[in-house]
Amino acid sequence: MPTSCILNLINGNVRSTMHLSVEGEDPQSPLTDAQLEALAIYNLSVPYPLAPERPYNDRLSDRARKGFELFFVEGDADPTFPGGNEVCGDCHRMPFWVSTNTPGTGMDAPTWRGAGDRHMILPQGRLNNAEFPWMRRVLDEGRDEFSIWAFSWSGKAGRRHAFSPVWNMVQEGSTGFSGSFARQVTVNETIHQNEDDLRLLAALEESALQGKVVLETEGVFLGSDKANKVALQFNPASDGKFYVSKNGTGENWDRAGLLNLAKDGRFIGTFTARHGIKANLFTNPQPAIWPEYTLSRSSQLSMHGNRHNFPKLKEDGVITISGRHFSDDAIVFIDGRRVSAKLTLDEENVRIDFEESPGSGLHFLQVQVPGGRMSNEVLLYVEANELATK
């Protein structure tokens, strides 16, 4: 990943805002070139915040699915917008809901990714002015992100509530990790009384089987006179007893065995869903997918006003999209579940051959680098005449 762009920003800040200079003299950076490069790499390695409401099985809620359709297809029924509904996704484009050089202003269309973690909206944050009475009311009530971002779909008559599901899209849309990532379950003598924890543990195992997370367990086996520490890792390649000792003893356990030991007071352990070995953002950027564009690659970032042409899966079982930061060994997911498919890549042109249909209607497509991050979602329409299983 090139560092030149972020280096330019860092240099400007270090030489001016962060460093006192003598009037009339060119301020010099107090950092060496190596330090500046390290700072650039650090900034480029900071990921977007996790989607706070993403389901742990990665299947979007009905409201989030509607939000995607409103944002990228149907649009906002703004009575002041000429020519029909305003489709936000025409400017805030896939893969990362952003573009540059907005017609008429030349400003960037800021990304909606991570909107639930910030209060500034619009280019230059020009709406974030406490002197505006509508903004003052929100500030006085606690400055929650939803109320601020909802100004984007509000008018004199107030908020257009029919468009509010886009916030569920924001809160659930992928920023690179499965909804299982970083979730934990602790098992002890009372685990069998907690159905929610049991369901979550089963879901974490399913995510590990699909390669979305690495599931590990730290705990102790309790004997009559001492406690023995244990570290286990869920290994999908194991035959039934998936929990393998990390210390090389060769001992394996299955979930039922560990839960029975916990019920008898002989095991306490915390199960944690971790990311894989290719999750460093600088060396392994988040995979990106978007509908196939007809314009040249150099102009894809400024396709304002051009509606996304989302893929439609027909009887031949083949779609073509665009993508980057993954290869033909990437894992394909539909609605959060791994599916059998073959990828063929030609630069940023991606062909996907599906083994079977997910069923007619609207679905959400993702890819994942094995051991790495998951891509953004792309809307996938499947026609009523489904393909037969190949």
Image: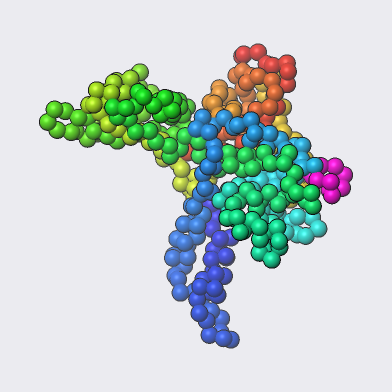
Q: Is residue 133 above or below residue 368?
A: below
Instruction: Name the dominant secondary structure of the magenta segment.
Output: loop
The residue nearer to you, when weighing 269 against 315, is 269
Q: Is residue 264 left or right of residue 60?
A: left
As drawn, the residue found furthest toward the left would be 225
What residue span does the magenta drawing correspond to? 78-86
Q: Can you give x and y, in whole percent of width and height, for residue 387 in the image?
A: 68, 16
Q: Can you give x and y, in whole percent of width and height, for residue 219 in the image?
A: 27, 34
Quick one: quadrant of the C terminus?
Answer: top right
Is residue 52 in view from this perspective?
A: yes
Is residue 292 in view from this perspective?
A: no
Indicate whether residue 233 is drawn in magenta: no
Q: Quadrant of residue 340?
A: top right
As drawn, the residue found furthest toward the right would be 83
Q: Can you give x and y, in whole percent of width and height, for residue 48 in the image?
A: 53, 48
Q: Is residue 334 above or below residue 285?
A: above
The residue nearer to you, when weighing 153 against 201, is 153
Q: Residue visible at 48% across and 52% down?
A: 45
The residue nearer to you, when weighing 315 against 186, is 186
The residue nearer to you, when weighing 209 against 257, is 257
Q: Is residue 223 left or right of residue 122?
A: left
Q: Can you give x and y, in whole percent of width and height, for residue 351 in the image?
A: 65, 30
Q: Residue visible at 45% across and 60% down?
A: 38
Q: Residue visible at 49% across and 52% down?
A: 46
Q: Is residue 20 left or right of residue 124?
A: left
